[in-house]
Image (cartoon, grey):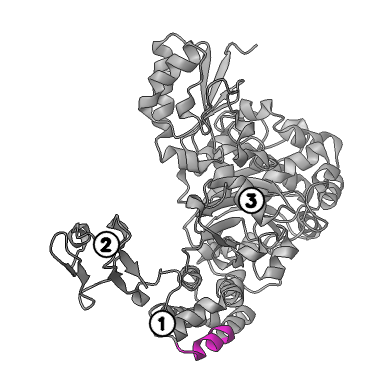
Amino acid sequence: MDRFRTHCLVCTGTGCVSNGAFEVKRALEEELKRRGLEHEVQVVGTGCNGFCERGPVMLVQPEGVFYQQLRVEDVPNLVEEHFLKGRPVNDLMYAPTKKDETVPLMRDIGFFKDQVLVALRNRGRIDPEVIEDYVGHDGYAALEKVLTEMTPEDVLGEMKKSGLRGRGGAGFPTGLKWEFCRRATGHPKYIICNGDEGDPGAFMDRSILEADPHSVLEGMAIGAYAIGAEHGILYVRDEYPLAIKRVEIAIGQARNLGLLGSDILGTGFSFDARVVRGGGAFVCGEETALMASIEGREGRPRFRPPFPAEKGVWGKPTNINNVETWANVAPIISRGAEWFASMGTETSKGTKIFSLVGTVNNSGLVEVPMGITIRKIVFDIGGGIPGGRAFKAVQIGGPSGGCIPAELQDTIIDYESLARTGAIMGSGGLVVMDERTCMVDVARYFLEFTQSESCGKCTFCRIGTKRMMEVLTRICEGKGEPSDIALLEDLAVRIRDSSLCALGQTAPNPVLTTLKYFRHEYDAHIQEKRCPSHVCAALLVYGIDPDKCTGCTLCARVCPVNAITGERKQVHTINQALCIKCGQCYTACRFDAITRE
């Protein structure tokens, strides 16, 4: 019987750790001990809770009270009030209560309300470094079920019925992919977990590995049984040290309990796994480049066929799925294919994880059912746009995804619906943009990333993306020509149709979608030499409104090049020949006297 009356679940995922979560956890443990409460209140370090915007966060159970943005100096008062006197501390909650109101619980917070957790089912509620916590939440029960009650064909049939599609971006049916590998000749067979997450602002895979590494290992073991593989590799980018640490701990614990290794659970089935650290090349997210990296070769894509299922790593049959896909496997086996297929749309079953970032009030990691609308994610879960500004667009699918305008915010999230807009599901990045965003600059930013990450093997990807970058940069600098639009479109089609891998094939998406939905912004940059969103510095002209200027001299004091002159309490002026358009005067002015055109 549990001797603790209360559990403090402190998020120790990377986001919260970067804001001092380990220090808060340590201070909490020390304060509870000082107050003689260490045998009544247990502090548990969990993985990512999802609400990264508010970290460090802590959930107190069984009460369900959710604390946010905790600091070490908050701990003594928190322990005194909540754990000694039984009075939750309003000021430390996400949604403080008014007098006589009920204490708001985590389930009442809008960020969590519409989420449906499958791959993230254990986030924020178990210690990822303690296998007993995972087992206590039905961990490895699915593996036991397949090894004692199901044949490999039964498992393949269940996965195909579930409708699970690969969550790494392409969306290929998982059960069918496994079946191809099972039918392939050759031995040994390998399965790989693709954890080479390289999209800017994306942290789905990292969070799963940090919060629930055993869910991935169990999924891989089930997949290995269905495919007939004995060897597993988790390819995780080296920039994820906490994820790597917890995966390696989980592998060791699973081996010690006989859940990895030889003769698992006495069934005669053997499977083991190890971690390979990725060097950080974005292109290694492509499966053939990833396999080359594992083999110690340069990470470059190769032609297919042969596909990895026939000739993969070291020339042997190989199945590759990403972290999120593997995390979905065990609940499908435990709860049944029909249960999973009951969520989502006709062609896109289950749930999808997104890293919700950008100009949105509640950023973080969210898992939502397929078929939810963009509007619901941005406004109900994300809490809308800060400062009451207008919602302009979302960029979905990573750096090679597409930009979807606000007028299409009722588009549902599934593979086909997103494709019709010109975007892609990708691995799950969702960047929210408000009215201050320049869509030409956005296209330039994402193309700059994909261009720099191109392996250079394909001529059009190597040179074409560089040429597109030059054109976009020229437009943002006010040097664009009307013919540049046709040139961008021509280059985009050629790069898309001539590239070997998905990096090049999808690299033009940000340009094509911004041209499709925000053509007027390109026209303003090219024809009027004006940036409507006041982002492109080369096209801005700063001035001072004489009717609003009070002569406070603040703008002159912050100007780094002394371009602003004027006597105190007299109207100031800006010398355009000296102005470097840094915007510091615009930010500093308290009277809205600085104009920007």
Seen from the viewer's position, the closer of residues 153 and 399 is 399
Quadrant containing the C terminus is bottom left
Residue that appears at 70% across and 43% down: 219
Left or right? Give the position of 134 relative to 388.
right
Q: Quadrant of residue 581?
A: bottom left
Residues drawn in magenta: 481-490
Disc 1 marks which residue? Answer: 529
Q: Which mark is residue 377?
A: 3
Disc 2 marks which residue? Answer: 585
Element class at badge 3: helix
Residue that appears at 64% across and 67% down: 423
Relative vertical location of residue 489 with respect to residue 358 in this rendering, above or below = below
Residue that appears at 74% across and 47% down: 223
Nearer-N-terminus badge (1/2): 1
Residue 474 in percent (x, y) is at 41, 82
Seen from the viewer's position, the closer of residues 501 and 476 is 476
The rendered magenta stretch, by its main secondary structure, is classed as: helix
Amino acid carrying label 2: it is Cys
Relative vertical location of residue 145 with respect to residue 369 in this rendering, above or below = above
Q: Is residue 268 visible?
A: yes
Q: Is residue 484 magenta?
A: yes
Question: How many other residues sit within 10 Å of disc 2, few (<14), some (14-19) or many (≥20)?
Answer: many
Residue that appears at 39% across and 85% down: 479
Element class at badge 2: helix
Q: Outermost residue toward the bottom?
A: 483
Q: CA distance from mark 1 to mark 2?
A: 22 Å
